[in-house]
């Protein structure tokens, strides 16, 4: 296998893993309150997939998390922990997380960049008094 085929294979695996994670997340959220047996089965399949600690299946939750460089416990906490929050708690948590990320972004922006046009202040001791 040459380098191009290896890269393509790895990219295909990552895309497949991302698709599996996305579908399981959608099933978990969409069928939280099932109205039929099929919806209930989809929900429980997704729930058990997230809770599983199985490494034997190539696209188990833990293997998908590893392939996508995600912390499995953080993903579980976000997806399974939000079940008890309700809609208000869920959106409060999401908005709080977004606000913290924005605050970090602004902090980095203003502490790492300097205005090249600005003049450094002159200490008051260097100014002659008339």
Image (cartoon, rainbow, N blue to C red):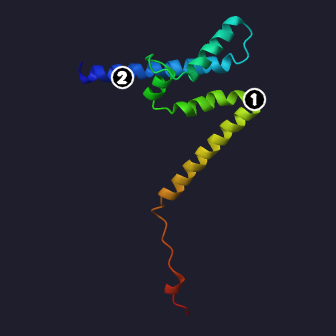
In the image, farthest residue toward the bottom: 130
- Picture coordinates of residue 35 (x, y %)? 74, 10
Mark nearer the N terminus (2 vs 1):
2
In front here: 35 or 3?
Answer: 35
**Residue position marked by numbered label 1 in the rendering:** 86
Reply above or below: 2 against 122. Answer: above
Q: Residue at x 54, y 83 (%)?
A: 124
In the image, farthest residue toward the top: 37
Crowd class of label 2 (few under 14; some 14 to 19; many from 20; radius 10 Å): few
Q: Residue at x 67, y 18 (%)?
A: 30
- Picture coordinates of residue 101 (x, y %)? 58, 44
Secondary structure beneath dot 2 equals helix
Measured in 3D between alpha carbons, the distance from the residue under mark 2 to the one under mark 1, in whole angstroms, is 38 Å
Reply above or below: 36 against 128. Answer: above
- Picture coordinates of residue 33 (x, y %)? 73, 16
In front here: 112 or 27?
Answer: 27
Residue 34 occupies quadrant? top right
Q: How many marks?
A: 2
In front here: 47 or 3?
Answer: 47
**Residue position marked by numbered label 2 in the rendering:** 10
In front here: 126 or 57?
Answer: 57
Q: Residue at x 76, y 33 (%)?
A: 88
**Circles 2 and 1 in contact, beta carbons < 8 Å:** no
Residue 1 occupies quadrant? top left
Secondary structure beneath dot 1 equals helix
Crowd class of label 1 (few under 14; some 14 to 19; many from 20; radius 10 Å): few
């Amino acid at each position: 296998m040459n380098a191009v085929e290896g890269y393509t294979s790895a990219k295909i695996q990552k895309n497949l893993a991302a698709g599996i994670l996305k579908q399981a997340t959608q099933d978990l959220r969409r069928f939280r309150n099932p109205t039929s047996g099929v919806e209930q089965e989809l929900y429980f399949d997704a729930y058990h997939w997230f809770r599983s600690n199985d490494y034997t299946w190539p696209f188990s939750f833990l293997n998908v998390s590893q392939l996508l460089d995600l912390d499995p416990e953080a993903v579980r906490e976000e997806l399974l922990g939000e079940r008890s929050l309700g809609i208000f708690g869920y959106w409060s948590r999401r908005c709080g997380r977004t606000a913290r990320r924005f605050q970090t972004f602004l902090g980095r922006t203003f502490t790492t960049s300097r205005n090249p046009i600005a003049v450094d202040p002159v200490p008051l001791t260097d100014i002659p008094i008339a």
